[in-house]
Amino acid sequence: MSILLTHGYYLSSDPKEQRIMKPYPPLGLLYISGYLNSKGVANHVFDSTFSSQSEQLSFILDKKPEIVAIYTNLMTKIEVIRLIKELKSPRFNSLKIVLGGPDVTYNIENYLNEGADFLIIGEGEETTFELYHAITGNTALADVNGIAFIENGAIVKTAARTKFRELDDLPLPNRDAIPNEKYLDTWKKNHGESSMTISTQRGCPYTCKWCSTAVYGQSYRRRPAQLVAAEMKMLKEKYNPDAIWFVDDVFTISHKWLTAFHEEVVKQGAQIRFECITRAERLNEEILKLLKEAGCFRIWIGAESGSQKIIDAMDRRVDVNHVKKMIQDTNALGIETGTFIMVGYPGETEGDITETIQYLKEANPTHYTITIAYPIKGTSLYDEIEKDITTAPDWSTSTDRQIDFKREYSRKYYDYAVSKVVNEVEYHREYIRNKLSVKALKHKAKSVMAGTLMKLKK
């Protein structure tokens, strides 16, 4: 076999994920593998999640591919660059290295300078197939749309690849290529239930300034509902997961599609408990009931802030009060809720953080996650703050998360703000349950301490 697909994520070197232990397979690579199989191109997949880089290199040495295609993103970039350096050593006999993923689109020169031979820009299935034939058949690279490479010392970027219009033409991801039982067992051991992933759509038509659309673009393309239900039924019968995570950006964007999805899931007997992400304005009482009947047990409803000022600055185009109501309505229906919070967005003040705390108390999501805003290259947020960047570490040894910029207050202020938000909200929850319990008082003490440190770091 002349092509091997892999990535640069290693669970053993991720302390945070080792605490969480909710790993998911590299679905994008499995889609490419499935597409290559459908075109008669035999391929290997090395899923590095449960392995080490040394095991990965040994596997590549054993299979002797002509091409190694590697998925990369902003979190795996450093490991991918290390992998490239190893693959460029003489023992690998001058194989060609192809990179794809969201991080390559706006870092073309950087990745090519680090040793990649070719970059795939945008969706990978058709481009990988055509590039494979161009490399192995020694035909014109310029005829392959959606790639970048160096020729005669200059960077060449070919015409953009036309995105898949009909997603029903895509074969299912090649899940047989990876150790699914390791994922299922890891989930079961750590959480008492297993989970798998399904993708039903590509692209997102919304314009949130901090969100990258580097691969699928600002579009909306959806797989037919009957095919999604059939995939659910197949997973149910073959792997028997306890739950499904739909990886789509906005699962309920089309009410027409969701109605058809509900009908197909029921008709095909494909019900599996599932969770999804959506936007508040794409929910209502009828849609919530359809989701519950189809098996939905948790909905993540994005807000990012409890301050309408900050939400508007993000170009989220949503009313924070409507987000709060949808979380409350979802809770009332017996479906778990989750929401995402971001602090440190440009222009955010102490008053905005106070509004966020109050929003979380009133909305009362079952789960919430908090991060400090960081700029991803290629997004509107990055373009806006680029002139105000104060910390820009070496590209090859850092991630976008380490970029810092001039904010309303110091970066350290927002570290303490995260603690303030979490402990104030948890104090509120514990107080409602058990009044002034020891646990409640501990949260309150931590909240007061964080607030004091925030004032010192203004």
Image (cartoon, helix red, strand yellow):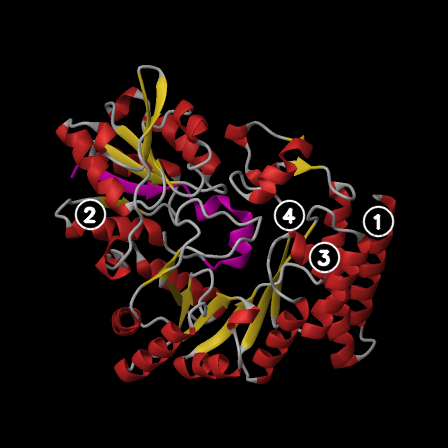
Q: CA distance from mark 3 to mark 4?
A: 15 Å
Q: Check residue 4 for magenta coloring.
A: yes
Vertical placement of residue 169 versus 282, above or below: above
Q: What SS does tag 4 mark?
A: loop
Vertical placement of residue 60 versus 244, above or below: above
The amino acid type of the residue labelled 3 equals Lys
**Cβ atoms under marks 3 and 4 closer than 8 Å:** no
| Dot in front, 3 or 2 | 3
Q: Which mark is residue 360?
A: none
Mark 4 Cα shell of 10 Å, populated few (<14), some (14-19), many (≥20)? some
What range is drawn magenta here?
A: 1-22
Label 2: which residue? 36
The amino acid type of the residue labelled 4 equals Ala
Label 4: which residue? 373
Q: CA distance from mark 1 to mark 4?
A: 20 Å
Q: Residue at x 62, y 36 (%)?
A: 403
Label 1: which residue? 453
Quarter of the image where the C terminus is located? top right
Q: What SS does tag 2 mark?
A: helix
Q: Horizontally, is 290 left or right of 172 in the view?
A: right
The amino acid type of the residue labelled 1 equals Leu
Q: Nearer the viewer, residue 370 or 168?
A: 168
Vertical placement of residue 129 versus 157, above or below: below
Label 3: which residue? 309
Q: Percent from the top left, x then y, of residue 391?
A: 66, 31
| Dot in front, 3 or 1 | 3
